[in-house]
Image: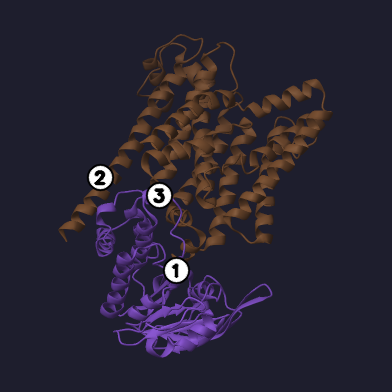
Amino acid sequence: MALLSVEELSFAYRDREVLRGITFSVDAGEVLGLVGPNGCGKTTLIRCADGMLSPHNGRVMFKGKELGTMHRREVARAMAYVPQSTGNRTSSTVFETVLMGRRPYLNWTVSCADEDKVAEALRLLDLEGLALRKVGELSGGERQRVMIARALVQETGVVLLDEPTSNLDVCHQMGVMEVLRGLAEEKGLAIVIALHDLNLAATYCHRLLVLSAGSIYSYGAPEEVLTEEMLGSVYGIEAVVKRDLPAPYVVPIRPGRVREGV
Amino acid sequence: MEQNVIIQKGYSRLKKTRALFIGGLLAALVILIGLAVTLGSADFTVGESYLAILAGLFPGTFTAPGMAGIIVWDYRLHRVLFAVVAGFGLAVAGCVMQGILRNPLASPFTLGIASAATTGASIAIVLGAGVAGGEFLVIGNAFLFALLAALAIYGMARYRGIGSETMVLAGIAVMYLFSAVTSLLQYVGSAEELRAVVFWTFGSVDKSTWPKLAIVSLVLACTIPYLLYRAWDLNALAEGDEVAASLGVPVERSMMVMMMIASLITAVIICFTGTIGFIGLVAPHITRMAIGGDFRTLLPASGLVGALLLLSADSIARSVLAPQVLPVGIVTAFLGVPFFIYLFLHRRSA
C-alpha cells in the first residue's frame, strides 16, 4: 500500500483555481520530485498533502486513512513538512529548533532518547558543530539544513519538502539529497520534494511529477518525463536532454542560438 | 555516538545555565522584596522587615519587632507584592504576545489593550458612566474596555483570517481608535477630569490592597500554569504558522486562546494600576537575550524579570523624592530604557 496517496485533488484560493484533478501516490522507500515553473501549484500541493490546506475536491490519504479524519497531532506523526522559507530568525539554538520536531510526541519534558535523536539528526546533516549556536546567527544554507533535521526527528512515514535546496551550494545540495534518498531507501520513508533544479531532481528522484498551471502534465520516471517536448510546453524553453549519463541531463539553449555542439 | 554525547552535554549545560538564571532572579526578588518593604518613613532594618513578614506567616514561631509587623502587613507588603505580581503578569502577557505574533514590538500596549483600558477609565472619570459603581467605576470600565479591545482584535482577525500579521494590524487599528476616543474625552473634560485621566495613564501601584492583590494573584495562578503547559505550542508558533501546524499545533485555536489569556492578564492588572507600559515589551527581550527562546524557561524567567523591574521602579518612585511618590510608569521607562539599550547594543556588538 502507498504511504501517501492523493486522489483527484482540486484546490482554489477564493475564485482562483490553483490545482485541478491531481492524482498520485508515493510508496515507502520512494522519492517523488514535484517540478514545474513558478506558480504552477507545487507549494499549494505540498500544503494540501500535509493537511494545512483543505482541498475543495478529492482527498489525501496516509496508509489509506483520509487526512481529514485524523487528529492534527496524528497527522504530525505521519507527515513532516519543511517549508520553503528557512524559518524566522529566532533566538532558539539549533539543538532546540531541531528538538521541536519531537513536539508531536512530547508532553512537557524531554527524554534522553529524544535528545539522542536530535543529536543523531544533527550529525547526519553535518550540523553537530552548530548545535548550541542560535538559528538567527546561521547562514541561509545552514538554517535550511536545520529545518530538514527537524523534519527527520519527527520520525514520520512521509516527509514533504518545499524546495529544500534553494539556499544551498552544489555540494550541500547533493549532500542533502543524498541524505534524503538514503533515508527513503534505508528507513522506508516516502519523500516528496518540490524542486526547481531539474537535473538534481533527475539524479535523486525515483519519479517526477510535472505540474503545469495546476494540472499534471506528466508523471513517471525521470527518463520518461524529462523530454525536450515537455521543456518546451511547460517551461517555454528550448533545451536538449542528454541521455548518455546515469540520469537525464537538461541543457537549456539560449534563444536564437544554434544547438550544435551541445 | 561519542559526538552525540558531546552535543547532549552541551545542551545539558544550557539547561543548567537557565535554571541558575531563574534561581538567581528568585533570590534577587526575595532580597528586593525585603529592601522594598523596609523603604519608608518608619525606621527599621531589612532584618526586622523579614522578621515582620515571617511573624505574619508563622505567628507562633516568629515575633515582629515593635510596630514593624503592623507597618509591613498593613501598609507596605501588599503594595510590594502587587508590584511583583503586576510586573510578573505584564511580562508574561508581553512574552506570549511576542511569541504568537512573532513580532518583537507586540505587547499589551502596542496592541491597543492598554489604550482601550485608558478609554474605559476616561469614560468613567469624565462622563461618570460605567458598568460598576463607587470604587469600581474606573476599574470596571478599564477592565471591560481592555477585554473589548481584545475581542475586537479577535473579531477582525477572525473575519480576515487569523494570522500574526492580521492580528498586529487589527491591534494597531484598535489602539488608534481608542486613543482618539480618549483624546476626545480629554478635550471635552474639565481641567480636574483631565488631570485625573492623565494621572491614570501614568500608572501606579498606589491603590493596591490585599483584596486587589488576591484577585490579580488568582488570575495569574489560574492562567500561567496553562501557558506553561502549552510552552511547546508557543515554541512552535514562534517558528511560523505553517511549521507549527505541521508539528501538530492547532494554530488558530492556540493563537486565539493564548491571545485572550494574555489580554485577560493585562486587563486585570492595568484596571487596578493604570497603564504601566514598557514592562511587557522589554522584560521578554531582556530575558530572551540572556537565556534564549525556549518558552518553558522564557515564560517564568520573563515574569521574574518583569517583577524585578516593576518592584525596582516602584521602590525608586517611592524613595527618590520622598515623601512625594512618583508615578511608577515614568520610573519604569527611566530605569528600563537605558538598561535595555545597553543590553541591545552590547549584544549586537558582541
Chain on which label 3 sits: A
Chain B representation colour: brown
> Which residue is under mark 2?
B13
B223 horizontally vs B129: left or right: left
Q: How many neighbours does mark 1 have within 10 angstroms: few (below 14), some (14-19), or many (20 or more)? A: some
Which tint is chain A? Answer: purple
Label placed on residue B318: none
Q: Check disc 2: other Cα within 10 Å, few if <14, some if 14-19, many if 20+.
A: few
SS at circle 3: helix
Residue at figure coordinates x 53%, y 82% from the top left:
A234
- What is the x, y in percent for residue A64? 44, 86
Quadrant assignment, res B178: top right
- The quarter of the image holding the C terminus of chain B is top left
Name the residue that disc number 3 marks: A136
Nearer the viewer's eye, disc 1 or disc 3?
3
Q: Amino acid at mark 2?
A: Arg
Check disc 1 and give the amino acid type.
Arg
The residue wearing badge 1 is: A73
Quarter placement of the N terminus of chain B: bottom left
- Tell me if I can see residue B153 in this picture: yes
Determine crowd level at label 3: few under 14, some 14-19, many 20+ residues with C-alpha closer than 10 A: some
User: Do residues under tags 1 and 2 come within 8 Å of each other at their CB atoms?
Assistant: no
Secondary structure state at the residue bearing disc 2: helix
User: What percent of the width, then of the height, locates residue A83?
Assistant: 45, 65
